[in-house]
Image (cartoon, coloured by chain):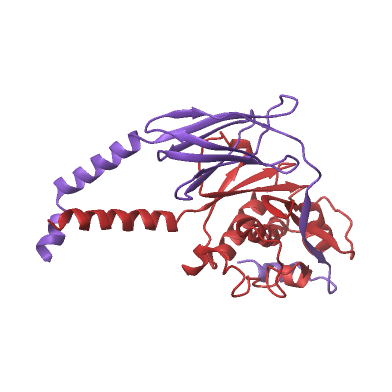
Amino acid sequence: MKRMVRSCFNPAAVCLCLSFAHLAMAQDSRVMGHIMDAGDSAVSTAIVTATQVDSGWKRQVLSNAQGYYQLAPLPPGTYRIEAVKPGFKPLAHTGVGLAPGIAATVDLRMEDAEVSETTALQARKTGSGFPLAYLQLFLP
Amino acid sequence: MLRIPVLAGLLTLFASALIAASPVGVYLDFDEPPSAAAIDAMRQEAAAVLDRVGIEVAWRLVSQNHGNEPFERLAVVKFTGKCACGSFLPSTREILVLGTTAVASGRVLPYSQVRCDAVRRILPEIEFASDRRLGNAALGRVLGRVVAHELYHSVLGTVHHASSGLAKAFQSTQDLTSDQLPFDGGDWDLHPAAAVK
């Protein structure tokens, strides 16, 4: 057993594993695109989700100020690409196939939606307040 | 002969550890430049509360987002009003909304809003603190609790509120400024990472 464990941490074996990992990363794919609204204006801060259909594995990214996003690295497979943002209808593209090392472009045009509802945290002042000395105790 | 399965097992364990430790990316967006002390205290308090339920947070700023940093899960928190004490906002005993999370067609969207002015209006002892540094740190700690409450909705995708603890829909200022305001046991049971701790 000792010999087996020792052989697992053999530098040559570790190098081999790292080489395979590097090779696997080099084969990773990516999805990028631009998110616009109905009037062709960029949609910033939309959450874009890539979900691998077979495994359910997913990654999310936030579109930048110009509406661009890039999701990488993604393992090869078939993906569902979805964008959400309050004030817009959620939008999804299904069947986005990513072969090893491929970069796919998926541009999304989001339509306006009805006003979103919200869940709220409410509070009210209770008691008569406390002096600043209390704050000093309250802080770490 | 056993080397390959053992190596594969070790790699799988390593990958599982990475996934289990995968943080939630939380993007912060400010209407007005906040107090650095308040934001430091906010991050510290929210991270401490969420750490107790097994959630690790990676803080980011919307203003520095390039659109290319992937997370397993992310959320956006927008801060409205001024997140710094000392502009002498009039206090009130009315019920105010401190934070909201978006819901569309029954689905929770990971977009929250935290209302700094409302927090300052119900906590005059913080707003009018003569020591601005202490006031901002205390403000940040309360903001951290509001952020943690809204992330509970965002991360779990639930509109549910608890009957006690930080997941309660209504908080008093005594709750918000108490020594500790944790989530109740079981609040995060739906989340797979909650079982870790």
Residue at horizontal 20%, vertical 48%?
A14
Residue B39 seen? yes
Q: Quadrant of the N terminus of chain A?
A: bottom left
Between residues A52 and A18, which one lies in front from this camera angle? A52
Q: Is residue A53 left or right of residue A133?
A: left
Percent from the top left, x then y, of residue A21?
Answer: 29, 42
> Where residue B52 sits: x, y (%)?
54, 68
Image coords of residue A116 (percent x, y): 78, 48
Residue at the (58%, 58%) spot, across then down: B44
Quarter of the rendering containing residue A74: top left
Q: Is A73 above or below relative to A6?
A: above
Q: How many marks?
A: 0
Of the pair A11 and A55, the residue shown nearer to us: A55
User: Looking at the rendering, which quadrant does residue B151 occupy?
Assistant: bottom right
B82 or B5: nearer the viewer: B5
Q: Colour of chain B?
A: red
User: Among all residues in the image, which is located at the extreme left?
Assistant: A3
Asked whether the viewer can see residue B85, the reply is: no
Residue A15, image x, y percentages:
20, 43
Image position of B28 with respect to B194: above or below: above
In the rendered image of the structure, the colour used to display chain A is purple
